[in-house]
Amino acid sequence: MAFEKYDFTPITQSIHQGLIENVSPLLTTIIEWTIIGVLYLLFIAVFGLFLVYAERKVCAAFQQRLGPMRVGPWGIIQTIADFIKLLMKELITPKSVDKFLYNLAPFIVIIVPFLTISVIPFAPGLQSLDFDIGVFFVTAVSSVGVIGVLLAGWASNNKYSLIGGMRSGAQIVSYELSVGMSLITMVILAGTMQVSEIVELQRGGWFLFKGHLPALIAFTIFVIAGTAETNRGPFDLAEAESELTAGFHTEYSGIKFAFFFLAEYINLFIVSAMATIVFLGGWMPFHFGDWAAFNNVMDFIPGLVWFFLKVFGIIFLIMWFKWTFPRLRIDQILTLEWKYLLPINLFNILLMATMVLLGWHW
Amino acid sequence: MKSFFNYIAEIFSGIWTLLTGMKITAKYFFTPWRNVTQQYPENRDTLVMYERFRGEVIMPHNENNEHKCTGCGLCENACPNGSIEIISKSIVNEEGKKKRIIDQHIYHLGMCTFCNLCVRACPSDAIVMGQKFEHAHWDRSTFTKVLNQPGSKIMEGIKE
């Protein structure tokens, strides 16, 4: 088995071998699961905090401000301080809420990124769950989050929360369609739903370039619908500070609020990672035609770095959307989805299928 | 068919307007040296306020301790919340005429909303908005200021 440069498979295999030679297979599995769980937990916590900081800085730069500057140099400890504050806050359960659903909702919301992150290949060999319906799994699981949002809105027994939850429901049910269909477009081109396969197929060139026009349309739609799916601006009418105080999480405090907050940012990462994997070649380095020297230099950069570079590119794009565009009204959001994105998407699938049939792609 | 072309045109014009907006924010993002935020207590020594900043009402005096205030009271009338009190006195000038001049131009900083109306009302540009803004003090009486300096007199050639 030939490993490529910067492949993580030897490391993971040596850990596995070392465990299986010393302890029973059952214990090996349990230990491996624990390691993976702890790693993901750490990654989500650290990356979530970092994204919050990045968002505040990026938002500030878009508005000609400086952003957090006081806590630590350039304010880098700001989000950690915020997180500690949230941890120490009292968990208030209002008197007339539906207690069980109210307490359940944040956990459903936070479970989603934990599930979806499992199929994301960070680097060659650095993926915990690689099965043949990876893309389908992501679309299926990511729609579970809306249940949490709806539950939070309903169980809070608060008119703002309910309106926020219902808006979010209407929005995500609509945009789920666009995300799924733009992914289907790319699955037609790839011919597989296995995430590692999709990345491997982009060795010769990213799908965005391989599939040219339909891929570009699908990419645009995916980024728009992905922004809507993560409930971020300009589609953030589920929380809509100016109208609904905080929407579905108005009544939540402390760590439960932090769960909603963290889930939003990790979902942002998931959407960006999916866009990276499906359109921008995952951890594949950027290659240009037959410029051997250029390609060699690009190969020198590890896959992990490539992956995160692309992900940060998409994250920046989505933040740029948020801090540029005004919030859409609920009817405008539904109009955008059902009258524009969906017809274009259906047409685009047809275009892509024709192209793949006739072989008009690289 | 026409509506179909309109639909397509609408999509492209929509994308165009979105890109226009993104271009503007991108310009802000990539020119961080134009940021307006000041790191205030740290850069206190080098801080330069904007020309349009309104910190307090001041009355500039020249090197001969002369100001431009005629004591007409227009600023007192213009002030919406009575922050300005004009106390004038009568003197007899060289030609033997009785003349009203300013005695004390009293300015209550604590009541001022920095609306700039007095400055705009002044016919002889005697008062302007100053840049000083660190007014916090333990004693309220320091907020009542007399703008014309003791012993000052009106500049030559200011029309009454």
Image: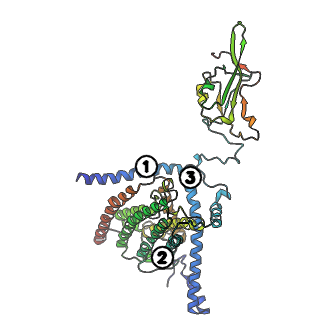
**Subunit that carries the residue with mark 2:** A
Judge the density around disc 2: few (<14), some (14-19), many (≥20) Cα neighbours within 10 Å.
many
CA separation in Å, label 1 and label 3: 18 Å
| Residue identifier under label 3 | A61
In the picture as drawn, the residue positioned furthest to the left comes out as: B1
Q: Is residue A107 in sight in this rendering?
A: no
- Alpha carbon separation for disc pair 2 and 1: 37 Å
Q: Is residue A84 above or below residue B19?
A: below
Point out the residue furthest to the top here. Answer: B95
Subunit under mark 1: B
Question: What residue sits 59% from the left and 69% below the top?
Answer: A45
Q: Is residue B93 left or right of residue A293?
A: right
Say if mark 1 contacts mark 3, CB within 8 Å. no
Q: Amino acid at mark 3?
A: Ala
Numbered circle sitting on residue B20: 1
Vertical order, A27 against A352 (above or below): below
- Percent x, y for residue A158? 50, 61
Residue at 68 percent across and 59 percent down: it is A72
Q: Specify few, some or many for label 3: CA neighbours under 10 Å numbering under 14, 14-19, or 20 or more.
A: many
**Residue at the disc numbered 2:** A119
SS assignment at label 3: helix
Residue A40 in view of the camera: yes
